[in-house]
Image (cartoon, rainbow, N blue to C red):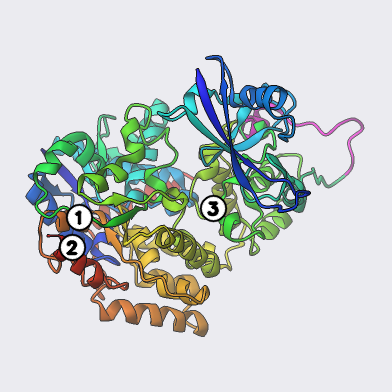
Amino acid sequence: MDVTLNVRRFDPESESPESRFQEYNLEVEDYFTVLDALIKVREEVDGSLALRCSCRASICGSCSMRVNGHAKLVCKTKVRDVANAQNQVTVEPMGNLPVVKDLVSDMKPFWDRVRAVKPYLQPEGEEPEAEYLAPNETMLHLAGVMSCIMCGACVSDCTAIEVDQRFLGPAALAKAYRFVGDPRDDADRSRLQMYSQPGGIWDCTRCMECVQVCPKGVAPMDRIMGLRDMAIEAGFSNNNGARHTEAFTDSIKHSGRLDELKLPLRTFGVFNVQAMMGLSLVGLRAFLRGKTPPIIHKAIPGKDKVRRLFDKVEGKR
Amino acid sequence: MKYAFFPGCVSRGGCPELYPAAVKVCERLGLELEVMEGAACTGAGVLQEKNQLLGDALNARTFAMAEDMGLPIMTICSTCQGTMSQAHKRMADDPAYMAEINEVLAEEGLEYKGEVVVKHLLWILVEDLGLDTLKTFITTPLQGLRMAPFYGCYIIRPTGALGFDEHPEREDSLERVIETLGAESVEYAGKTRCCGFPILTINERNSVSMVANHTLEAKGLGADAMVTPCPLCHLNLDGFQPKAASMRKTSIDLPILHLPQVLGLAMGMDAKSMGLNKHIISAKKLLSSVALSA
């Protein structure tokens, strides 16, 4: 088939180093991946096109790029699956990371985040004579998260990093989960405390971009939710995120539905003057428009049944 | 076409204009609704981060109630839809998990058989009613208006739980509805991003930055308004737009409309009855352009 690759180019050494799109028209085989097509461009059309790849078999994690706006391993992405009706495909470097040249991203901010979560075992007690052993069944639940190949796709499309580079982000926090869940690691408490700081687990928006784009099914966001639960259970709940989750849960338990007026009060604490003033301003604007929840919170009919369901499930833990 | 109507908390809470607008629009379209008054909140993904089994059991309870009514569920909130779709998928994928949940439901005499259908009004328009039929209801085409679609994360990701494989038309359903109403759909990167609402009380700066990015991008591309099937997105994009504007030291002034409100406008329904006077960002200018084109 004939396709048009619309590739974002950037050369920091050019006279006007601004990114621009360049179109390449080429013929590709039906089995071609986007990577095959890009390599064909580099070898036959334009040798100046920079891209990064190695294994070409979705193992090494080198070739993450944005295809039609979303991060993908281009070696795992068939041209025919992503070409639009006009047989066009748009290829750009990953988002949220600096660009070295064309489709090559600078992975330093990615690795800095991974290092920040202390991605190594921290065992305590006497050292064993040989290696630290863990029974198979205690590691099975980590098989999914250990499939991460550090390709950066999740970081590329993370909506929280997009507005705040300080966020540890999905890959690093999935890695963090892997160590909290490892029976050989004894630093769970200090880890959970560290991950509960600003820029950590509570800054995730739960947008599921990382779950969607991960080529290995790691589902980083689900790991972040796991860490939130473990952090609350470990007592690291003196923050807005944990208070919000607790207040939300209580509200459903007691009335079957969300009490939208009480939720922010419990999240911030009524004595948080600055937050309360900010809230009152937004609240006043809404009130003047008649856009406020009922002052008296109304429970759903049969709220007792919901409470019994809560008691039964919570009793199972 | 009859549905068990799951309105969600926000359509009668923080966005009290949504519930009546949805009910009136459905009535006009001949979609019969039976409200699920005894159904609990979906947990919105928040409850699930604390205890997934609990969240899924609550939703299975709602599913069992709909099965007893013999009706598919209609939602009017992307977050409700996504949370229910995810619960539905987890139980469909794991019969043992579903059995564990049914054990919890048994106490109330309920059983979830795994047959429920849960659809957002947006999907109902495209899949059940059909866009050709929708067109026959349009009396005031929104010609000349540029509308920016804003989906809300939960109705667009993860595609595996949302049935996009069987229903690929769900991917651009909002654009197609906007076009069916006679308006032009604005294409922009922000349409499938996060509105920031889930972290509003946790990291307001980041949350409001998201509002600023998406509204400014759409506005820059000439959008007259934004349309969303998610009341949570609406709360942030509308309610915190003034803050977003002052954060960026600019004016934005982009009205954010609920999906049923836009449908109502195109069907010639009264703006006030659609609750269009209740938004923080006034829709007045937009309404006068609709009147002009009528």
Q: Is residue A183 magenta?
A: no
Q: Amino acid at mark 2?
A: Val
Dot 2: element:
helix
Question: If you read the primary sequence from the N terminus, does the residue marked by circle 1 or circle 2 appear first?
Answer: 1
Residue at the spot x=12%, y=55% of the render?
B140
Circles 3 and 1: CB atoms closer than 8 Å:
no
Q: Quadrant of residue B63?
A: top left
Asked whether A136 or A40 is in front, the reply is: A40
Dot 1, crowdedness within 10 Å: few (<14), some or many (≥20)?
many
Secondary structure found at label 3 = helix
- In the displayed structure, would residue B151 be above or below residue A148? below
Element marked by disc 1: loop
Crowding around mark 2 (Cα neighbors within 10 Å: few <14, some 14 to 19, many 20+) is some
**Residue A282 can be seen, yes or no:** yes
Prevailing secondary structure class for the magenta stretch in the rendered image: loop
Q: Amino acid at mark 1?
A: Leu
Q: CA distance from mark 3 to mark 1?
A: 32 Å
Furthest residue in direction right, as rendered: A129
Query: Which chain contains the residue that carries disc 2?
Result: B
Type of amino acid at the residue the image marks with label 3 = Thr
- Measured as percent of width and height from the top left, residue B217 is found at 46, 59
Check disc 1 and report the residue beneath it.
B142
Q: Residue, x 31% and y 58% (percent of image)?
A: B231
Label pair 1/2, CB-CB below 8 angstroms: yes
Position in image of residue A249 (x %, y %): 41, 58
Q: Which is more foreground, mark 3 or mark 2?
A: 2
Label 1 – label 2 distance at C-alpha: 6 Å
Start-end of magenta stretch: A126-143
According to the picture, the residue beneath numbered tag 3 turns out to be A159
**Against B59, is A35 above or below?**
above
